[in-house]
Image (tube, rainbow, N blue to C red):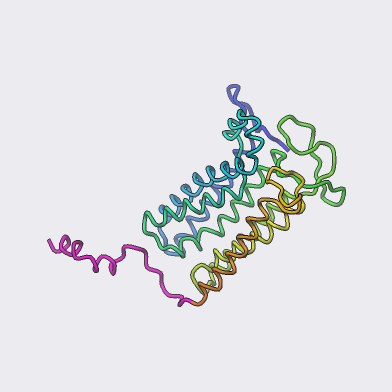
C-alpha cells in the first residue's frame, strides 16, 4: 500500500483520491470515443459523466451515513470525516445514476442509448477505482493464508489488519471491473434491444459484487441478519431483480432508432412553436 503519494508545501496528496480521479479520466476519455461511434455528442456525454460523478460522491457519503448512523450519533464529530471519506460505492452508483438520468431528461438526450453507452465505462471506472482501495488499505478481504494473500503493514492510515494474510479482494474487484467492461462493450455493439446493456450491467455486477462480498473482511458496508448479508449484498440482490424485470420488459419492444425528446415530431405538434418558426 502507498496511502500518500507525496507531500507538497506541507500538504499530503493521498493516493486514494488521485487513483479515483485517474480512473474517472480514463473512463471518460474512452466514453468520448465510444460516443462518436454511437453517433452521440461527446461533449454531452462528458457532461453527463461529470454530473454522475458529482451526484455519485453525494450518494456515496449519504449511504455511508445510513450504514454507520449509530456510530455517527455516538460521535457527531465523525461527520467531518465525510469530507475525506469516499463513502459506500453502491451509494455512489445509485446517486450517480440519478444524476445521469436527470441530465438526460434535462438535455433531452436519447434515454436508453445514452445509458447503454455509458454503463460499460461505469463498470471500468468502478474496477479501476478499486486501485485506490489497494493503495489505501481499505475494503480489505477476510483472513486468508492461501495463494495471492495480501499483507498490509501497520500504518495509521490503513484500516486493514497488519501482518496477517488477507484475501486479495481488491485485485479481484479491479479485474472484475475490467472483465465486465469488455463484456458490456461487446453487448453494446451487438445489442438487440434498448436497455440490454444496462440490464446486463445490473445483473452481472450485482452477481459478482454479491459474491465478492463474502470474501470481504471489513464491516463498514453494514452487516444485517445476524451477519449473514451486507448492505451491498441487499442492494446487489435488488439490482439483479431489476435486471431481470428490465430485460423481460425491454426485449419485447421493437428495436428501432431512438429519437431524442424534443425532436421535430414533438415540435411539430406544438402550434406555438410552429407560429414562431413561421414568423
The N terminus - image quarter? top right
Is 18 situated above or below 211? above
The residue closer to the viewer here, 33 or 82, is 82
In screen coordinates, is 174 left or right of 44? right
What is the residue that sits farthest to the top in this orientation?
10
Q: Quadrant of residue 140?
A: top right
The residue closer to the viewer here, 130 or 243, is 243
Residue depicted at x 49% and y 57%: 33
Q: Quadrant of residue 166?
A: top right
Residue depicted at x 46% and y 75%: 255
Q: Quadrant of residue 241?
A: bottom right
Q: Is residue 270 magenta?
A: yes
Is 157 situated above or below 145? above
Residue depicted at x 58% and y 47%: 23
What is the residue that sits farthest to the right in this orientation?
145
Q: Residue 272: x percent and y percent?
A: 18, 62
Is 233 situated above or below 1? below
Q: Residue 107: x percent and y percent?
A: 37, 55
Q: Is residue 180 magenta?
A: no
Count the marks.
0
The residue closer to the viewer here, 217 or 175, is 217
Q: Residue 223: x percent and y percent?
A: 71, 48
Q: Residue 204: x percent and y percent?
A: 64, 63
The C terminus - image quarter? bottom left
The magenta span reads 253-279
Is 56 situated above or below 200? above
Amino acid at each position: 500500500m502507498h496511502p500518500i503519494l507525496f507531500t507538497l508545501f506541507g500538504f499530503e496528496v493521498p493516493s486514494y483520491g488521485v487513483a479515483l480521479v485517474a480512473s474517472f479520466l480514463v473512463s471518460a476519455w474512452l466514453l468520448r470515443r465510444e460516443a462518436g461511434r454511437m453517433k452521440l455528442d461527446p461533449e454531452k456525454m462528458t457532461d453527463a459523466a461529470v454530473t454522475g460523478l458529482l451526484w455519485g460522491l453525494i450518494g456515496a457519503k449519504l449511504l455511508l451515513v445510513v450504514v454507520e448512523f449509530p456510530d455517527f450519533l455516538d460521535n457527531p464529530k465523525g461527520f467531518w470525516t465525510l469530507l475525506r471519506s469516499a463513502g459506500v460505492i453502491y451509494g455512489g452508483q445509485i446517486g450517480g445514476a440519478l444524476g445521469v438520468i436527470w441530465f438526460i431528461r434535462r438535455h433531452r438526450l436519447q434515454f436508453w442509448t445514452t445509458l447503454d453507452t455509458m454503463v460499460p465505462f461505469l463498470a471500468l471506472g468502478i474496477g479501476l477505482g478499486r486501485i485506490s482501495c489497494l493503495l489505501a488499505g481499505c475494503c480489505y478481504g477476510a483472513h486468508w493464508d492461501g495463494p495471492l494473500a495480501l499483507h498490509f503493514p501497520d500504518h495509521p492510515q490503513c484500516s486493514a489488519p497488519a501482518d496477517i494474510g488477507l484475501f486479495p479482494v481488491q485485485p479481484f474487484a479491479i479485474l472484475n471491473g475490467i472483465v465486465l467492461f469488455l463484456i458490456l462493450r461487446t453487448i453494446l455493439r451487438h445489442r438487440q434491444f434498448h436497455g440490454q446493456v444496462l440490464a446486463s450491467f445490473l445483473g452481472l455486477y450485482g452477481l459478482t459484487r454479491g459474491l465478492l462480498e463474502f470474501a470481504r473482511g471489513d464491516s463498514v458496508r453494514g452487516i444485517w441478519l445476524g451477519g449473514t448479508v451486507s448492505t451491498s449484498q441487499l442492494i446487489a440482490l435488488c439490482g439483479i431483480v431489476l435486471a431481470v424485470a428490465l430485460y423481460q420488459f425491454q426485449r419485447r419492444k421493437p428495436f428501432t432508432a431512438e429519437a431524442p425528446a424534443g425532436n421535430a415530431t414533438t415540435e411539430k405538434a406544438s402550434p406555438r412553436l410552429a407560429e414562431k418558426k413561421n414568423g
